[in-house]
């Protein structure tokens, strides 16, 4: 028995080390990328508010993912200037990713076995969406942590009702919906997971009532004091106008991320069904359909990233299927039980290799699956690309002016204004010099010496001429291009003429 225990502990140690090393390997570059529009908006407009109540009451756009913003503010309070601010902020999301993976590993291995859980986690940490959201200053990875932990508490309550399990589940549901209200969809997935154990007739049983009533009550209680703000946000018409394209990205994002392991999980699930087991336990598969009513029933459809919080539930389905696949090998006599570790090792190598393949072809995946439908949430968004470097744009600009005061700077929406504003504040550029159109109002006039910063694609499509006519500016020359940015200023001759006239 001691020998078996030592072997199991060694397997756990090797699996945990492999997953941890793979995670750091795949996210190492993304940790040092520049902030993009949504991240800078979260920091500048919400995290820097004076306190938790201010953050909570200032729920005016979905960028304020309240619980995440409050926790990020607490994290920022611990900052010590040894590393760059933006890298430090990203470490909080990475910590959420580490805790999510650790919760899955520790909470699921007894239910499904480490040989089934380890390959799935290796595929998860090697996926492109994990790289994006485990380093993003957004609440999606924190949401996955709450949902994963909530499932563990729900299972503990289901196996043996205890007050601690009920309280923990309630707190986690409140934190989940308080981070992103649509996290209730993932909590509904948890309810579907346990529904077969109670059946339709058992919906009102005390154990099951807690599972479905607490998420609903949490959503109402958390947002009722700010209901007016919530209704205004719901009235915003943001999203994708192509429901089919949104559905394709939601499902292909998950399927491509975990494809090698997903194939064997499906085989295991089919084996379970063909053996004629109780088909009630196939009901959790309905969680796969949760996105469809919201995508097809709302115009525009929600952004695909909204549904990434369902991944922990879908990973549960995969773990169940992969465990059944392992059982199929044993039952068929093709692989002795004690050698299943070799199968798990092969699957783990496949998962790691698939992560490398995704990075090799992510630009192709983005072009083929997202195209011009909207922002890429799952494969290769513009802010993950090497040419996205707003901080470097500001550094080059400061070097050109060499300590001289900068003139007013107009930013187009395509130039991603908020990262430039945030990095500008961090490098000592005064806020009053910035000009850009926003919901609070549009820029009416610009001085002749103003700089124009726009996306390079805007410049190639005549945006510079449009701005010259709009603000009656003198002829402009290209000062420099840096990644996605094109920076223009007035021709020296035009500047001299304007000075003489004055």
Image (cartoon, rainbow, N blue to C red):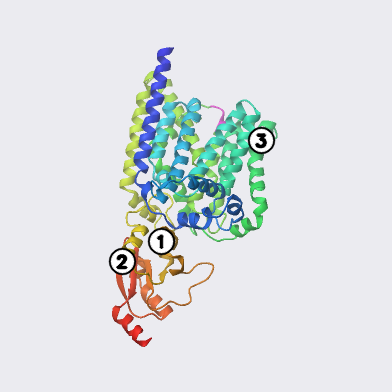
Q: Say the numbered circle drawn on residue 402.
A: 2
Q: Secondary structure at mark 3?
A: helix
Q: Are marks 2 and 1 in contact (CB under 8 Å)?
A: no
How crowded is the residue under tag 3: few (<14 C-alpha within 10 Å), some, or many (20+)?
A: some
The residue beneath circle 1 is 428
Q: Are marks 3 and 1 in contact (CB under 8 Å)?
A: no
> Does residue 168 sit above or below 67 in this rendering?
above
Q: Secondary structure at mark 2?
A: loop
Which residue appears at 53% of the width and 52% of the height? Answer: 295
Q: Secondary structure at mark 1?
A: loop
- Residue 270 shows in this picture: no
How crowded is the residue under tag 1: few (<14 C-alpha within 10 Å), some, or many (20+)?
A: few
Distance, label 3 to label 1, CA atoms, is 52 Å
Q: Say the numbered circle drawn on residue 458.
A: none
Looking at the image, tell me whether mark 2 or mark 1 is earlier in sequence order.
Answer: 2
Query: Of circles 3 and 1, which is in front?
Result: 1
Determine the image quadrant of residue 488.
bottom left
The residue beneath circle 3 is 210
Q: Is residue 437 left or right of residue 462?
A: right
Does the magenta segment cover residue 17? no
Of the pair 177 and 379, the residue shown nearer to us? 177
């Amino acid at each position: 028995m001691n020998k078996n225990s030592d072997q199991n502990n060694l397997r756990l140690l090797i699996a945990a080390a492999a997953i941890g090393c793979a995670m750091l390997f795949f996210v190492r570059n993304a940790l040092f990328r520049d902030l993009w529009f949504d991240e800078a908006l979260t920091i500048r407009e919400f995290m820097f508010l004076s306190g938790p109540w201010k953050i909570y009451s200032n729920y005016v756009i979905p960028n304020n993912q309240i619980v995440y913003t409050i926790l990020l503010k607490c994290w920022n309070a611990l900052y010590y200037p040894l590393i760059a601010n933006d890298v430090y902020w990203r470490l909080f999301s990475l910590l959420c990713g580490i805790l999510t993976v650790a919760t899955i590993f520790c909470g699921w291995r007894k239910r499904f076995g480490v040989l089934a859980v380890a390959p799935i986690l290796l595929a998860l940490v090697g996926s492109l969406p994990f790289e994006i959201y485990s380093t993003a200053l957004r609440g999606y990875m924190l949401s996955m942590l709450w949902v994963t932990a909530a499932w563990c508490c729900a299972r503990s309550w289901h196996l043996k009702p205890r007050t601690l399990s009920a309280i923990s589940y309630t707190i986690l549901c409140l934190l989940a919906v308080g981070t992103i209200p649509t996290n209730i969809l993932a909590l509904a997935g948890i309810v579907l997971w346990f529904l077969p154990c109670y059946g339709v007739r058992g919906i009102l049983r005390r154990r099951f009532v807690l599972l479905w009533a607490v998420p609903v009550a949490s959503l109402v209680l958390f947002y009722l004091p700010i209901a007016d703000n919530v209704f205004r946000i719901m009235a915003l018409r943001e999203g994708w106008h192509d429901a089919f394209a949104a559905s394709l990205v939601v499902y292909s994002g998950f399927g491509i991320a975990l494809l090698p392991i997903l194939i064997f999980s499906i085989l295991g699930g089919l084996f379970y069904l063909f053996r004629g087991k109780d088909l009630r336990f196939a009901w959790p598969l309905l969680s796969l359909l949760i996105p469809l009513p919201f995508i097809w029933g709302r115009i525009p459809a929600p952004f695909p990233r909204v549904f990434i919080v369902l991944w922990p539930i879908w990973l549960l389905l995969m773990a169940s299927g992969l465990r059944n696949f392992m059982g199929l090998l044993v039952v068929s006599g093709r692989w002795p039980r004690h050698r299943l570790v070799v199968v798990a090792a092969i699957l783990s190598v496949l998962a790691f290799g698939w992560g490398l393949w995704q990075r090799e072809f992510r630009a192709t995946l983005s072009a083929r699956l997202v195209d011009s439908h909207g922002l890429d949430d799952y494969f290769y968004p513009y802010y993950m690309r090497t040419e996205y470097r707003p901080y470097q744009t500001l550094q080059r600009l400061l070097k050109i002016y060499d300590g001289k005061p900068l003139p007013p700077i107009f930013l187009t929406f395509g130039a991603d204004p908020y990262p430039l504003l945030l990095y500008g504040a961090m490098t000592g550029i005064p806020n009053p010099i910035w000009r850009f159109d926003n919901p609070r109002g549009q820029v009416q006039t610009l001085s002749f010496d103003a700089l124009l910063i726009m996306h390079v694609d805007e410049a190639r499509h005549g945006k510079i001429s449009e701005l010259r006519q709009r603000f009656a500016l003198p002829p402009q020359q290209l000062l420099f291009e840096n990644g996605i940015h094109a920076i223009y200023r007035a021709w020296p001759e035009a500047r001299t003429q304007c000075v003489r006239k004055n």
